[in-house]
Image (spheres, rainbow, N blue to C red):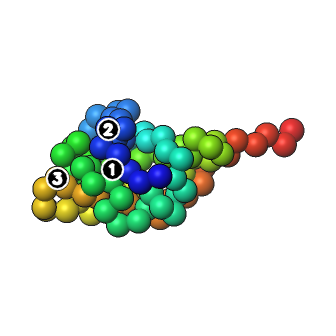
Amino acid sequence: MPYSTSTPPRLLAPSFTNVTGEMSLWGYDTTDTAATVDTAGYITNGGALGMKVGDLMYCTVTGTGVITTHRVVTVSATAPGAVNLGDGTVVGSGTNTD
């Protein structure tokens, strides 16, 4: 399913300082795969939302429960500010093997 500005990423933790500098934490739920989400320009209005280079986004694929993390790599200077996310890293899945 293509990205929709009516269901954008949500700000979970506004700007805070970590060892790499200032960053914010975002959350996003989608039926799209992590590979689709990290396609350049997938989030078309990230700049308008306040996303900036270095921010971290947790993305949950709602159909599978897989959670990936993505770093904001670039924010387009053109309106409405599409962002390019780094490749996702899986941090959790919907399975429990114990």
Q: Amino acid at mark 3?
A: Pro
Location of residue 86 in the rendering, given as x and y in whole percent from the top left corner: 41, 63
Q: x, y (%) of residue 84?
A: 33, 62
- Viewer-closest of 83 and 55: 83
Label 1: few (<14), some (14–19) or many (≥20) C-alpha neighbours in 10 Å: many
At horizontal 41% and vertical 47% (from top left) the residue drawn is 57
Closer to the observer: label 2 or label 3? 2
Label 3: how many residues lie within 10 Å, few (<14), some (14-19) or many (20+)? some
- What is the spatial separation of the Cα atoms under label 1 and label 2, in whole angstroms? 21 Å
Q: Vertically, is 91 above or below 41?
A: above
Q: Is residue 80 visible?
A: yes
Real-space CA distance between mark 2 and mark 3, rounded to the nearest whole angstrom:
14 Å
Which of marks 3 and 2 precedes in the sequence? 2
Q: Amino acid at mark 2?
A: Ser
The residue at which mark 3 appears reads as 80
Instruction: State left or right for residue 52 relative to residue 25.
Output: left
Viewer-nearest residue: 18 or 1: 1
Observer-nearest residue: 42 or 88? Answer: 42
Q: What is the distance, in whole Å, between disc 3 and disc 1 at their CAs?
A: 18 Å
Residue 17 found in image quarter: top left
What residue is pinned by disc 1? 55
Q: Residue 82 location in percent, x, y?
A: 25, 57
Q: Nearer the viewer, mark 3 or mark 1?
A: 3
* Residue in view at x 86 percent, y 38 percent: 98
Q: Can you see residue 56? A: no
- Please give the name of the residue rendered at 47% of the width and 52% of the height, measured from the top-left corner: 1
Q: Which mark is residue 35?
A: none
Residue at the (19%, 62%) spot, across then down: 76
Residue on which the image places disc 2? 6
Q: Which amino acid is tagged 1?
A: Asp
Closer mark to the observer between disc 1 and disc 2: 2
Q: Secondary structure at mark 3?
A: loop
